[in-house]
Amino acid sequence: MKFLVGYNGSTAAKSALTLARDFAKVFGAKVFVLVSMEGGSSEKIEEINKARADLEFAKEFLDQENVECEAREMVRGVSPAEDLVQFATDKNIDQIFVGIEKKTRTRKILLGSTAQYVILKAPCPVISVK
């Protein structure tokens, strides 16, 4: 089995990572951890460094429990939600884990919802974690 975690270092993302780790131990699954950035001139070096540090944390977190994992930083010029769905499709992922955070209506309209997009468009089941 193959699991995918959309990871951004937030509390909700850490909860999703923890649940994916627990499921992976039970099912003997490999966990892919994906950090997605749109790229281009809008990316700041601090954001890139944070993304890399988040990936390193996730890899170590899974390695501590002997869970097979692969951590990837994606920069393909698409939204994180589109990246997650495309990656899941390309790699035949069996289950996606995403953290959800409460947003105001205005924030959701302006920024959209990564989790909502993934839930609606994913080629496999999605578990959302608060």
Image: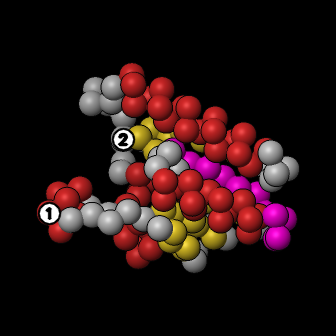
In the rendered image of this protein, does residue 41 appear above or below residue 24?
Answer: above
Magenta segment, which residues? 25-35
Q: Which residue lies furthest to the top in this view?
A: 45
Residue 75 appears in the picture as rendered: yes
Q: Does the magenta stretch include residue 31?
A: yes
The structure residue drawn at horizontal position 49% and vertical position 35%, both measured from the top left corner, is 51
The quadrant in which residue 103 appears is bottom left
User: Disc 1 marks which residue?
Assistant: 106
Q: Give the image location of residue 10, x and y in percent.
A: 46, 50
The structure residue drawn at horizontal position 18% and vertical position 68%, both measured from the top left corner, is 105
The structure residue drawn at horizontal position 72% and vertical position 60%, both measured from the top left corner, is 21
Q: Give the image location of residue 52, x and y in percent.
A: 54, 32
Q: Left or right? Give the position of 20 relative to 36.
A: right
2 or 1: tag closer to the N-terminus: 2
Callout 2: SS: loop
User: Disc 2 marks which residue?
Assistant: 38
Q: Quadrant of the N terminus?
A: bottom right
The structure residue drawn at horizontal position 82% and vertical position 71%, both measured from the top left corner, is 27
Q: Give the image location of residue 112, x and y in percent.
A: 26, 61
Q: What residue type is labelled 1?
A: Thr
Residue 18 vs residue 86, the one in the foreground: 18
